[in-house]
């Protein structure tokens, strides 16, 4: 039962819950970025460089072995077009995360900015008078 209790305490800590929410939002954000890259950016880039569809870009290392209409051994290909799309995905996500962290750090710096020390409150008149009397007594000795 001790291990179950420890796991419950671990799972209920705020950091774990925050991390879980972050992972879920990150997965959803990843889908949005993937759609942005696949559906908007790559077709635009492909159109600019000559109507190239990046998903079909590949180098065939070995042709498929066929017997009539049936594929006996599939072709071996390097699909570098998909790799290019994944790299663009990564760069967009990395840039977005960089911007979020930069904004968080900026807010932290504002919160951590040291407040200027307050001027000490003026001493009451009776304290000033007592200090003067003390100093006069010291000087008489």
Image (cartoon, rainbow, N blue to C red):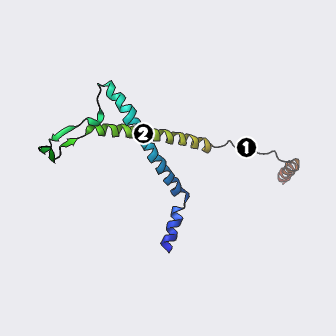
In the figure, 14 relative to 32: above or below?
below
Q: Residue furthest bottom?
A: 1
The residue under label 1 is 118
What residue is shown at x 81% (from left), y 44% (from top)? Answer: 122
- In the picture, measured across the screen, residue 138 lies left or right of residue 79, that is right
What residue is shown at x 87% (from left), y 52% (from top)? Answer: 130
Alpha-carbon neighbours of circle 1 within 10 Å: few (<14), some, or many (≥20)?
few
- Which of the labelled discs sits on residue 33, or is there none? 2
**Residue 44 image position (x, y, % from top left):** 36, 28
**Residue 134 image position (x, y, % from top left):** 84, 53
**Residue 79 image position (x, y, % from top left):** 25, 40
User: Is disc 1 placed on a helix, strand or loop?
Assistant: loop
In the figure, 120 relative to 43: above or below?
below
In the figure, 56 relative to 20: above or below?
above
What residue is shown at x 44% (from left), y 40% (from top)? Answer: 32
Number of disc labels:
2
């Amino acid at each position: 039962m001790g291990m179950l209790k420890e796991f419950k305490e671990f799972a209920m800590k705020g950091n774990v819950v925050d991390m879980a929410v972050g992972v879920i939002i990150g997965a959803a954000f990843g889908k949005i970025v993937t759609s942005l890259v696949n559906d908007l950016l790559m077709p635009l880039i492909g159109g600019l460089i000559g109507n190239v569809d990046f998903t079909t870009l590949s180098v065939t290392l070995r042709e498929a072995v066929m017997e009539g209409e049936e594929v006996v051994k599939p072709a071996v290909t390097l699909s570098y077009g998909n790799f290019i799309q994944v790299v663009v995905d990564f760069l967009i996500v990395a840039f977005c995360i960089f911007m979020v962290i930069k904004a968080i750090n900026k807010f932290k710096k504002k919160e951590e900015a040291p407040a200027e020390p307050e001027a000490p409150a003026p001493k009451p008149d009776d304290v000033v008078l007592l200090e003067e009397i003390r100093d006069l007594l010291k000087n008489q000795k």
